[in-house]
Image (cartoon, coloured by chain):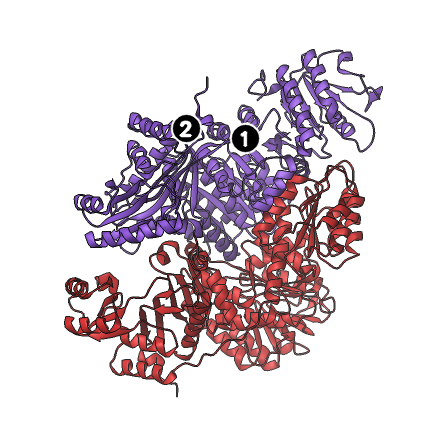
Chain colours: A purple, B red
Amino acid sequence: MSVGSSPELDELFRPASVAVIGASNRPGKVGTSLFRNLLRSGYHGVAYPVNPSWKSVSGVRCYPDVGSLPEVPELGVVIVPARAVAATLDELGSAGTKGVVVISAGFREVGDAGAALEAEVIARARSHGMSLVGPNCFGVFNTDPAVGLNATFSESLPPAGNIAFVSQSGALGAGILEYAASERIGFSRFVSVGNRAGVDENDLLTALDRDPRTRVILLYVESLAHGREFLEVARDVTEHKPVLVIKSGRTTVGERAAKSHTGSLARSGWDQLYDSVFAQSGVLRVDSLGGLFRLAKIFSSGLALNGPRLAILTNSGGPGIIAADAAVRQGLELPALSESVRAGLAARLPSIAAVANPLDMTADVGADAYRTTLEALLASGEVDGALVISTPTGTMTGETVARAILEAKATNPKPVVVCLFGLTDLSSEASYLEQHGVPTYTFPEEAVEGLGSLARYRAWLTRPRAPVRTFDVDRPKAAAVLAKARAAGQAVLPEYAARGLVEAYGIRCPTARLVRTVEEGVAAAAEIGYPVVLKVASPEISHKTDVGGVAVGLGDADALRAAWERVDRSVRAAAPQARRDGFEIEAQVPGGKEVLIGIQRDPSFGPIVVLALGGIYVEALRDVAFRLAPMRPLSARNMIESLRGAPLLRGVRGEAPSDVAALEEAIERVSQLAVEQPDVAEFDLNPLIVRPSGLGVVAVDARVVLAPPSRSAPSP
Amino acid sequence: MSVGSSPELDELFRPASVAVIGASNRPGKVGTSLFRNLLRSGYHGVAYPVNPSWKSVSGVRCYPDVGSLPEVPELGVVIVPARAVAATLDELGSAGTKGVVVISAGFREVGDAGAALEAEVIARARSHGMSLVGPNCFGVFNTDPAVGLNATFSESLPPAGNIAFVSQSGALGAGILEYAASERIGFSRFVSVGNRAGVDENDLLTALDRDPRTRVILLYVESLAHGREFLEVARDVTEHKPVLVIKSGRTTVGERAAKSHTGSLARSGWDQLYDSVFAQSGVLRVDSLGGLFRLAKIFSSGLALNGPRLAILTNSGGPGIIAADAAVRQGLELPALSESVRAGLAARLPSIAAVANPLDMTADVGADAYRTTLEALLASGEVDGALVISTPTGTMTGETVARAILEAKATNPKPVVVCLFGLTDLSSEASYLEQHGVPTYTFPEEAVEGLGSLARYRAWLTRPRAPVRTFDVDRPKAAAVLAKARAAGQAVLPEYAARGLVEAYGIRCPTARLVRTVEEGVAAAAEIGYPVVLKVASPEISHKTDVGGVAVGLGDADALRAAWERVDRSVRAAAPQARRDGFEIEAQVPGGKEVLIGIQRDPSFGPIVVLALGGIYVEALRDVAFRLAPMRPLSARNMIESLRGAPLLRGVRGEAPSDVAALEEAIERVSQLAVEQPDVAEFDLNPLIVRPSGLGVVAVDARVVLAPPSRSAPSP
């Protein structure tokens, strides 16, 4: 964020005066549309066009330059050619302007020369302490009637409302505004962040969190400007307001396009990490733009679901079944109603009505049945909310049903969502309901999707809030291990050293001995107890199985001797040059499930913990989860649960369940290691054996890669 | 299907005269709406109201009963109370009426008494050879201007078009008609099948296939009336016309509702089977009603994609990236354009345009750039179709872009789909494009979803059409095995007998010997060669591992003796009452991947082949596929590919790929067994070991359950 701006960013959203540098009268020019929009939006401040070519713009006196303005504009909107932007910012900054929106394109997105211009723009904004939106953006608006600021060049403006939208793509924002205008979706604020040279989505989340007119925040991003900061900020904002995000560039092809578009650096296959960051911060990721608006509608209504129990009330079976299917997919519950509730309902309904959940009143009922039944369902205490489906019949009109629903709703604060099946969102019935705080949808699946998002948001707000646990680890031992490796110039730690680090962080490793001769090995095995595992020990071989460097399940000395010879031959053939320290004899770990826990580091996201089901399934099934460190206990649990193979850990076919609690703790300990040991660039426990419940976990193999010395040198 | 009706069902869709028995003037009555609709729809035949209570209905002379009508109506629409329906059908049938639509409810859906009435109605319709639609249905319509038949009680009628809709839910159909009317989606025909006592979706698929006005067929079903017949009929119809289906009751809760709704019997967890039936018949399953209409739109346009290569042309990066993401999810390709094509395009575009795929012309271009660029892309031969995205800019209007796109499209038959980002479907621009055969969508994801469905349908039409293979199996041996078990009164075959059946069908089993004493076992193992597997042999123990009845990897006689004692003790403890035939000594099968192949039988679907990844993963990951037998080679391949764990069979981390060809053949052989041996009620190869490529498959364990004797007795 630029120096000197307030967290509310009032200089951008509530300026008392705005200068549009590059305002114009030429039809089709951005400067023409933008200044006209500013006048038409009912702006309460003073708008000044600045352009040496015009005496007036849209009938307003035009000034040749910033210096000639009769007052210092609080906000400058800049639409001059890229090469002139830095100088314009200087003029504005010197005068005392607090905020600038740079519409002009031709910066980072067009290559190196543009990037240099952009660096210059950033430097000027910083030096004057101005908040900077853009460059290469579509503008800003605020529908607050006390402000009335439309500093975009959109042809259409949505009505005032409580949805805020932040878009990394200007054109996408333009389309969204047009759509919202035609669908009458009410917006509070809109910002196109463009190249995010100054203000980014993190700053805007903070500002929109403080905006009392904004109830729900929508983001379109192609990348996160500062991933770790996003996690921190969003985790805080979602405590107060739901945040919905479309993150594009999911796929490699999409990423290629994203890269060439605004120059953002998306990493292939990194998409799941975004899922994790959103999960860790309570941000709801949405798959499609249509879905984004359907969900925004329900949050915009202010409804909250206080539990997952849904009643479905309908006058037709088919749509009820479709809704029930969708509810189960969304993780909602359709409780069977109690005998007494059902009896009470049945007494007022036709005998052919199916008094269950979904409750099909049949097409014979009129609007009044909606009122009495809905009222009774909400009052029953057996559901947390209701979906009401109305399909057209000859026995009632949409208007009477809408009125009946509102009457029932007035008796109870529980959320009610309506599917006026067959009627579009723009029908008068739908508008009437929505004006009275009842979200309506054309299709039952869409209504349920909305309710599902309320349930997900509620799960976030009511999550267990255990703090990050800090374990009492052996830091001196960890420091010694790393110092020794550093001194020996080892980028990859030998396994016995890696094991020392793992043990220092309180994760058990199998008993092991480093030996040099086969007879030393036999003696060590006798001490450890058969069966044992034999592994080649070499700092230069990091994937031992790939060179045939491991033999497992050795039951006695003969088997050990035979394996010694076999492994030795195999490693000699596969890695003849590798320096070897000997062999390790390890206790064979008894049965359990294999997982992988690792650490990766990223410039934007910082330390990342990786969890996967072990063995060949990691690669074949791509069943992997990511979380940013440090991790809370709940994150560890969610991380495990997010694996498709999680049922394997719970035990199938009468197997004992695995020690998931120990796995959770191991994940948290690795997370602690990631935070405390920045020298560790890469870290893998692969496999970590998760033993049956109560028996803990054992790290069978550890791989530790140190950061290059230069990078890990202490900063002065 | 009822006796005597034509495959075209003209008596329902094109009757020269219609009698409405139960027509009325009372407001809010179905008989009132229906007869009024019939008059208003511009019906070309003669409509007769029949009701003893009225002298005229809607101004048309009313008759007291069928016998008084001045001519025999070709179609009867029946809206009398349930108990009077059978008699009415008798009157109509005796007079010579060919088709009846029974709107009346109160049949199977209300319980046993209703079911008895329904049986009576079916019997009467059959005896008169009438086509019967319903009971408990919403009616039929045909927008053919030469017919103009609206025999429904819908308030709204969609415009004439080429989409046919068949709905198992009447109310859903009513909602759909209302929606289609307001969205101006053109329909050819509509049928609400209700309880499907006579005409079902299979009859209608055949009839709609023959209707020249119908281009795409939409189905809403909660179950399939005759699953196997559906497969046969749909496989044929999809050769000519796309069939899109919503199958609800996906989930157990949904199924519960489906059951209480129209009395259809949905089986829990059976949903995947429907997926398979749709896959095997080329029917495209859709997830949501919104999706159904978005896909119907593109098929309705008549466009066809002759390959998966898509160009995305846009004037804004963000929507282009979103579309690219969606395209990859849909399995479409975004080929990089050749150097020469790109050079040609770049010459006419602004220098900041990203001439790639997606091709972002930037917001600076006008409508003419759309025309020239699209024309060049289509002419390049490097793509099979194009998605054109237009977001609002100040530089052009929606109308000029629409015209430019149509001009370019006129030069080339390749499909073009448009996303007018920000404009709704009902905008004048969208209507204009759609009238000229260009489907338009509000959001890029929706446009791509449509193109993806074209690609899937094309994949179906161009699939390899190898016929079902019939292998030369040892039928006498199979018959002998089954006869012997039957004679011994064995419902579950002993494993050695089951193995005989498996071998008779040409699937390899490991060498094995049945032995009674440990010394016999040691002798057998010496002959077979170590390592061996020891298994308890008992016709009364079908899951041997559950009782500790299996020991694997026995390397020598000592190990075998120890295992013998251990297994014996364990089985004695777990299944003390089980009659035992001794033990089996089997050759240990060398490494490979475990799968399960099985047979299930279903009254509606007939023999079903089941495939799953083996071991504990079957249950934990629910990674299962179903296909109806007999199976074509392509079905076997698709079945394997549909498993999430399919990559495991292709080999990961340098493993040799598994012998997938042998697995395909084994699936086809099991399919043949399922068809040829109706006495086999259940059949499982679990596990079947798929060895590395070229080494075939081995069935390690087989379980065969015979059908009860009564069921398998030859019919007289």
Residue labelled with disc 2: A678
Name the kind of residue labelled 2 in the image: Pro
Q: Quadrant of the N terminus of chain A?
A: top right
Q: Residue A414: x percent and y percent?
A: 45, 38
The answer to which of marks 1 and 2 sits earlier in the sequence is: 1
How far from the left and from the top, in percent, is residue A488?
A: 36, 30
**Whole-Å distance between the Cαs marked 1 and 2?**
39 Å
| Percent of width and height locating residue B699 | 34, 69
Res. A381 visible in picture: no
- Dot in front, 1 or 2: 2
| Side (left or right) of B115 relative to B70 | left
For residue B35, which quarter of the picture? bottom right
Judge left or right: residue A643 versus residue A656.
right
Please name whichever residue, B39 or B381, is drawn nearer the observer in this view of the structure: B381
The chain carrying label 2 is A
Q: Nearer the viewer, residue A195 or B290?
A: A195
Within 10 angstroms of label 2, few (less than 14), some, or many (20 or more) residues?
Answer: some
Q: Amino acid at mark 1?
A: Arg
Q: Which residue is mark 1?
A: A215
Q: Secondary structure at mark 1?
A: loop
